[in-house]
Amino acid sequence: MSKKILIVEDDKFLRELMTRKLLSLQYEVVSASDGEEGLEKIKTELPDVVLLDLILPGINGFEVLELAKKDSAIAKIPVIILSNLGQSEDIKKGLELGAQDFLVKAHFTPQEIVDKLKLILG
């Protein structure tokens, strides 16, 4: 059974790039382009892991994370924040809200992101 990854990312280019990369590795990929859709898909798709951008239209990634962690049905789903925000207070806030990891987009290639996913998925 392939692992399901939800990508919540408003940048169409990056979302499609990551989707293609993960599909090529036999992962099942679901995506959302804003916070509300992302939160809804966490609940309906129950992915094995979520890649979450922070700067999103509508509710932002911090709010998505906070709401997801308060919902017992989905609270245990690991969330990796993938964002351009790299300030230490943003990273600290993301981890305090329950993110498993915090990756700054500029510092990671798609392959390195996949390697992080593999670690979390076991």
Image (spheres, rainbow, N blue to C red):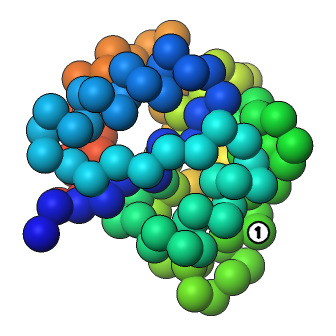
Q: Which residue appears at 25% of the width and 28% of the height? A: 21
- Quarter of the figure with residue 88: top right
Check disc 1 and report the residue beneath it: 67
Q: Which residue appears at 76% of the width and 35% of the height? A: 56
Q: Is residue 95 above or below residue 15?
A: below
Q: Which residue appears at 35% of the width and 65% of the height? A: 48
- State the image coordinates of residue 59 (x, y, percent, origin top left): 85, 48
Q: Which residue occupies the foreground of this view, 18 or 85?
A: 18
- State the image coordinates of residue 32 (x, y, percent, origin top left): 59, 45
Assign the C terminus to one quadrant of the image. bottom left
Q: Which residue occupies the foreground of this view, 89 or 5?
A: 5
Q: Which residue appears at 67% of the width and 48% of the height? A: 94
Amino acid type, callout 1: Leu
Q: Is residue 59 left or right of residue 115?
A: right
Residue 31 in view (yes/no):
yes
Q: Is residue 56 left or right of residue 28?
A: right
Q: Is residue 43 above or below residue 88?
A: below
- State the image coordinates of residue 70 (x, y, percent, origin top left): 73, 79
